[in-house]
Image (cartoon, helix red, strand yellow):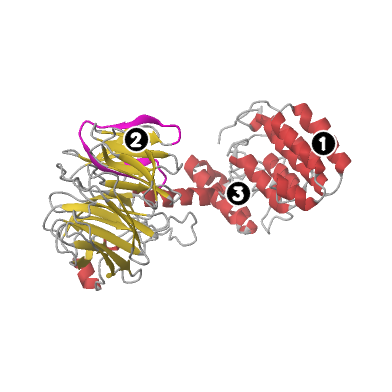
């Protein structure tokens, strides 16, 4: 490591001394830079062995030194101090600078005056000498809080007035600290300060804060748990690059093998037909899983809505209820936030919508404002007490559960709707190839997305940041609603002027799925324009795809061929069959 400071009187900051002893650390710091009461049986005088290690050390690259220090820090954390001593002595490296070790020990022992003195020794080794002020502030803050917890109010007040305030650093924080003088009990202090209290835990956290904030360069003191951090980053990067990773992201390393690279098999992905549902007797225009993932609703040209029950173990669906009487057919469905209600809309000629009770299967509301209306889309307000609906003939209403009109917006030819989580704003795609935001409280609207071709449908991610659009003759487009920019155009899908509904899916909504006029279901990883899977089996246009929001390995698609297909992981295969499978990008059912 190279020195980070100047001045002949200051200790050298290099992490590797080629086996030479340091006079400044003699008697206080062991060869690895950490305090040790003994030499662990190793000779302290120089010998041919030390000459050999010196020569060996000179051949170590910078990366070799870094790895040795990382291993040493990890072993030290496990309590294997003798192993660390031997590693450092044999390699000729030093785990950390002796001055940093003194500083660490004084902080952990609560010897604040000595710790402040150590800072002056460390000043020349820092990237920014002004960091001393910030570090001293953190030290004095801990000192102040410990005095308060011990009931030494006068001493604490002295630290506040004579030591913290003269630093002229973070005045706002000093005002907050002064308020802690009014705490009548240590528990009250710890709660208000969000502090662990005097002792090892809070002092270790203080050291972590000093290291993580890069006040001390890594050549002087390694950031805390650096090896674990690097390994965790490597695992996370492999998961991010894994095309088929579709399980919970565990940030820990306890359940991960570090001996092999992370790879998810395609066979664990919902690429395989689990079930073909043929209960509809005409084109199936729409399907949607409930928010809790326990049900699927499908709407058809045959005038019915079928509600299906999901078995989470077998990933099989069985018919639960059939809701009849939609004379024009059902082209759109929306579950209420708590899944207790289901709204059904029809195609362009339909002036009515139906609000059904899911539990009883009874019709609660049949709404129609005018026979001239076209109510083809609907979206629930997050409060579950209101919804918005509209169509291409210029209707745009907000209604309650009884169908009473609460608000209306004139002259908006709506193609698709979405309620934003703020409960006030509604996104609507219209016949001007755009998505606009409409605020029903202050009656303002603004342009958010502008396309060059008609937007046939759109959906929004759970966090409200991204919108997925099916654009006529163009395919599937991903937009960032916050920055109002087109993020990605996904390739492969055939999209004309049919209304096709795509969806986000997977455990962390890392995937996108869409139907297509070429009879396929396409799946993309959100970051990749090329599909990672093309699912065949349907024989006519696939109108809608829905990914189960709770079971990331379950997906459903609805088609003009009159069927719903349920997609899941591969069925059980023996080892020979597994070895014989090839990883194709098109999967027959």
The residue indicated by pointer 1 is 159
Eyeballing the image, is 25 above or below 10? below
The residue indicated by pointer 2 is 409
Q: Which of the 4 image quadrants contains residue 124?
A: top right
Q: Which of the 4 image quadrants contains residue 273?
A: bottom left
Q: Residue at x 83, y 31 (%)?
A: 162
Q: What segment carries the magenta color?
A: 441-467
Q: Nearer the viewer, mark 3 or mark 1?
A: 1
Front in this rendered view, residue 102 or 45: 102
Distance between mark 3 and mark 1 Cα atoms: 48 Å
Q: Nearer the viewer, mark 3 or mark 2?
A: 2
Q: How many marks?
A: 3
Viewed as shown, does residue 135 lie left or right of 117? left
Tell me the element at label 3.
Answer: helix
Q: Is residue 464 magenta?
A: yes
Residue 45 appears in the rendering? no
Q: Earlier in the sequence, mark 3 or mark 2?
A: 3
């Amino acid at each position: 490591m190279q020195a980070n400071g100047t001045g002949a009187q200051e200790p050298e900051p290099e992490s590797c001394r080629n086996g030479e002893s340091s006079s400044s650390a003699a008697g206080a710091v062991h060869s690895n830079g950490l305090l040790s009461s003994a030499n662990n049986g190793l000779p302290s005088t120089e010998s041919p062995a030390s000459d050999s290690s010196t020569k060996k050390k000179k051949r170590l690259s910078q990366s070799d030194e870094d790895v040795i220090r990382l291993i040493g820090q990890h072993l030290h954390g496990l309590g294997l101090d003798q192993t660390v001593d031997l590693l450092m002595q044999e390699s000729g490296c030093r785990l950390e600078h002796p001055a940093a070790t003194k500083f660490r020990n004084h902080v952990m022992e609560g010897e604040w005056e000595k710790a402040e003195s150590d800072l002056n020794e460390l000043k020349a080794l820092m990237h920014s000498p002004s960091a001393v002020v910030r570090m001293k502030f953190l030290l004095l803050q801990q000192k102040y809080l410990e005095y308060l917890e011990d009931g030494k109010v006068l001493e604490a007040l002295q630290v506040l007035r004579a030591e913290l305030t003269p630093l002229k650093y973070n005045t706002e924080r000093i005002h907050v600290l002064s308020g802690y003088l009014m705490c009548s009990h240590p528990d009250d202090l710890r709660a208000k300060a969000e502090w662990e209290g005097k002792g090892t835990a809070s002092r270790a956290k203080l050291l972590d804060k000093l290291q993580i904030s890069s006040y001390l360069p890594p050549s002087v003191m390694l950031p805390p748990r650096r090896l674990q951090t690097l390994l965790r980053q490597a695992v996370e990067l492999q998961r991010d690059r894994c095309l088929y990773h579709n399980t919970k992201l565990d940030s820990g390393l306890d359940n991960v093998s570090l001996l092999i690279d992370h790879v998810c098999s395609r066979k664990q992905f919902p690429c395989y037909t689990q079930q073909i549902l043929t209960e509809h007797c005409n084109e199936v225009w729409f399907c949607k899983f409930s928010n809790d993932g326990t049900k699927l609703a499908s709407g058809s040209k045959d005038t019915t809505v079928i509600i299906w029950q999901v078995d989470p173990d077998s990933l099989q669906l069985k018919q639960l209820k059939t809701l009849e009487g939609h004379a024009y057919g059902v082209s759109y469905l929306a579950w209420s936030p708590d899944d207790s209600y289901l709204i059904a809309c029809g195609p362009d000629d339909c002036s009515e919508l139906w609000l059904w009770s899911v539990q009883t299967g009874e019709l609660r509301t049949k709404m129609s404002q005018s026979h001239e209306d076209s109510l083809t889309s609907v979206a629930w307000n997050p409060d579950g007490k209101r919804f918005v609906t509209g169509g291409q003939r210029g209707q745009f209403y907000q209604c309650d559960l009884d169908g009473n009109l609460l608000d209306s917006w004139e002259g908006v030819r709506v193609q698709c709707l979405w309620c934003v989580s703020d409960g006030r704003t509604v996104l609507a795609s219209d016949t001007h190839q755009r998505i606009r935001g409409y605020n029903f409280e202050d009656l303002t609207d603004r342009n958010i997305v502008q396309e060059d071709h008609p937007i046939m449908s759109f959906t929004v991610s759970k966090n409200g940041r991204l919108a997925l659009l099916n654009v006529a003759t163009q395919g599937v487009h991903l937009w960032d609603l916050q920055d109002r920019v087109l993020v990605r155009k996904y390739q492969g899908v055939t999209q004309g002027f049919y209304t096709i509904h795509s969806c986000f899916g997977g455990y962390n909504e890392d995937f996108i799925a869409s139907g297509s006029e070429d009879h396929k279901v396409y799946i993309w990883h959100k970051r990749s324009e090329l599909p990672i899977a093309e699912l065949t089996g349907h024989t006519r246009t696939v109108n809608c795809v829905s990914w189960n929001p709770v079971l990331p390995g379950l997906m459903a698609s609805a088609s003009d061929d009159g069927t719903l297909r349920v997609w899941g992981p591969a069925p059980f295969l023996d080892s020979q069959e597994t070895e014989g499978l090839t990883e194709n990008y098109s999967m027959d059912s």
